[in-house]
Amino acid sequence: MEKHFNLSRYKELLKLKESGEISFLDEKDLELLSYKASVAEQIHYNRKKDSFLLIHEYLSRVIPPDEFRSKFLEMEREDSKKATILLEDFQELEVFSLAEDLDEFTHLMGKISALCFDYDEVWDGTMEPMSENEFYYLVNNLYLQLQKAFPFNIWE
């Protein structure tokens, strides 16, 4: 099941923003940001097979951890750029739809993204960066949750 992107509300919010009637991070600004984020999330969702394959390659030790983190974050940047372009194409947005399970997918992928960003940072208050084993374990755990929520065969 899909839900359609509310183009009329999005256009209304854009007009309010352009006219200065929306201030930074007020309720309507946050609503506008959520519309923009949902488009990027859907683009990432549409490429989930690529994400799953990348995670699988890392967990199978086909690619090293640094390459995995770099490629994973690069995919997110690419999807964000595509979303920015799409958000200016009202004709395309008119038929754009969002997956019903988009929130669950975004939540799990967001956790992997946060791990990629936080890898070199202080992790659990011990003043030590996350170990590679801990990173692997956490990514694997999230991958298993993704497989359960979104059954797939990466080879199809």
Image: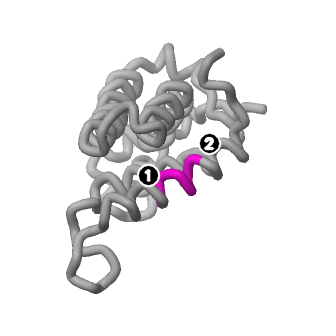
Magenta stretch: dominant SS?
A: helix
Q: Nearer the viewer, residue 7 or 40?
A: 40
Specify whether residue 26 is painted magenta: no
Residue furthest toward the right? 1
Q: How many labels, in total? A: 2
Residue 132 sits above or below residue 17 on the image: below
**Range drawn in magenta:** 138-143
Give the residue displayed 42% in from the left and 57% down from the top. 30
Is there any visible trace of residue 11 in the rendered image? no
Element on which disc 2 rests: helix
Tell me the number on the disc at residue 16.
none
Side of 107 relative to 74 (left or right): right
Is there any visible trace of residue 124 in the rendered image? yes
Specify whether residue 140 is painted magenta: yes
Give the residue displayed 51% in from the left and 22% down from the top. 93
Viewport quadrant of the C terminus? top right
Q: Nearer the viewer, residue 71 or 104?
A: 71
Element on which disc 1 rests: helix
Q: Which residue is mark 2?
A: 102
Give the residue displayed 33% in from the left and 22% down from the top. 85
Please name the amino acid that badge 1 sits on: Ile
Q: Which residue is mark 1?
A: 112
Give the residue displayed 64% in from the left and 52% down from the top. 145
x, y percentage for residue 98?
Answer: 62, 33
